[in-house]
Amino acid sequence: MTTAPLRSASLPRLDGLDVARGLAFVGMVLVNYGVVMAMGGRDPAWVKALRDAFTGRAAALFVLLAGAGLSLMVSRAAQRDPARGIAGARRIYAQRALALLIGGYAFYPFWEGDILHYYGVYLALGALLAPLRSRWLLCVAALCVGAFVAIYYWWIPYRVMDVFVPKFWTWDGQIRNLFYNGWHPLFPWFAFFSTGMVVGRLSLERVSVQVSLLIVGLILAVCAGYGSESVIEQLQDSDLPRYRSKPWTQLLTTSCLPPGPLYVLAAVGSSLAVIGVSLMSTRLPRAVWTPLARVGRMALTLYVAHVVLGLGLWEMSGGKEGRGNLQEVFWWWLATVAASMVFATLWLHRLRRGPLEYVLRKICG
């Protein structure tokens, strides 16, 4: 794949990335609704399979796209102003990081699965690492995965996630939650962001790059899945009890809990494949992809709205946490996606940005 470290400032917005972001939002809503409304639900099986397909993948795609967005902004800023553009772009992202960190912590009492405060950390580190070459960013990704493995097995035993115990607001809880034991901790989740920074440096407007993303993504995802099954099977047949223990087998699945190396590989693969398909989809008639693209452009606003309004209205209608069923989850999810598409289409028909996107840009630039 060819890279384009200095893109033209006049390049149009890559609508395909908005489509991918819209797909990530759609998947995240289904996962979040499933967790809150019907945790552990298994029927109907096809809804469970759909939810499981998005679990851990939709959020990873969101984070990877955030890294790509940072690289795109830095490249365009450098093209506009070679002397001060990069420094200005990094400063803007540092300001956005602080805003999202504060906003995420303010949002946490309403939504314990919040990803915004993690985003604040990702953006701050991304702005700091923006000058690194792509090979070093990939090394950072590998180090994040390795750090989680070391913490998981050799340093601190992996315990019940902090979001389920009342320790979040303690110093110990903060460190554990942010670095290794929350929903989207720095280790290994920053691997998605740094990989996204590399993706953002590719010539994404080229068909050859889009096809390569699809093919490479599918290969990574399939190899991770088959590799996980094969390694776990061999460990189960091993004569060494240590390697048949639950911590080892859990670490080698492609499940997002715990987020082991094969999960990261599988999620990176699925994210690359979705980005490739999304970029190619913009060659279809606009009516096919525009609703998803507009949802993607308003992802921050809709993310907050699906919790405050979506889950809020569900509770007001008599819903009880964890007592619903997946059939109910599916219809509520479908209604939320449809409402999001209609709202985003109407709003962006008149205005350039969503409400929260406008506020964030107004505050941080």
Image (cartoon, rainbow, N blue to C red):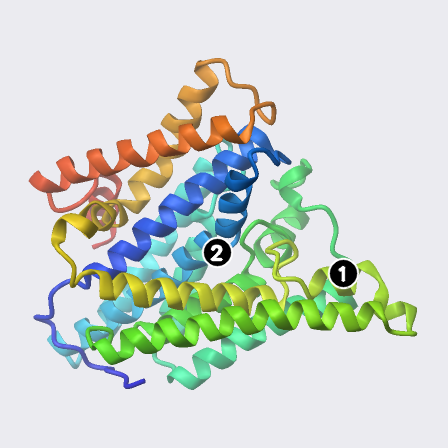
Residue 327 position in % (x across, y down): 50, 29
| 244 lies left or right of 287 | right
Mark 1–mark 2 Cα distance, whole angstroms, equals: 26 Å
- Residue shown at 49%/45% (left/top)? 50
- Of the pair 309 and 325, the residue shown nearer to us: 325
- Residue shown at 44%/37% (left/top)? 106
Q: Tell me if residue 69 comes above or below residue 62 in the rendering.
A: below
- Of the pair 197 and 258, the residue shown nearer to us: 258
Q: Tell me if residue 172 comes above or below residue 219 in the rendering.
A: above
Residue 23 position in % (x across, y down): 34, 51
In primary-sequence order, the first of circles 1 and 2 is 2
| 356 lies left or right of 129 | left
Q: How many marks?
A: 2
Quadrant containing the N terminus is bottom left
- Mark yes or no: residue 231 visible: yes
Residue 57 position in % (x across, y down): 48, 56
Mark 1 surroundings: few (<14), some (14-19) or many (≥20) residues within 10 A: few
- Mark yes or no: residue 201 visible: no
Identify the secondary structure beneath mark 2: helix
| 74 lies left or right of 63 | left
Quadrant containing the C terminus is bottom left
Tag 2: amino acid: Arg
The residue at which mark 1 appears reads as: 156
- Residue shown at 39%/82% (left/top)? 134
Residue 285 position in % (x across, y down): 12, 55
Q: Tell me if residue 106 comes above or below residue 93 in the rendering.
A: above
Identify the secondary structure beneath mark 1: loop
Tag 1: amino acid: Ile
- Of the pair 107 and 338, the residue shown nearer to us: 338
Q: Which of marks 1 and 2 is in front?
A: 2
The residue at which mark 2 appears reads as: 57
| 164 lies left or right of 292 | right
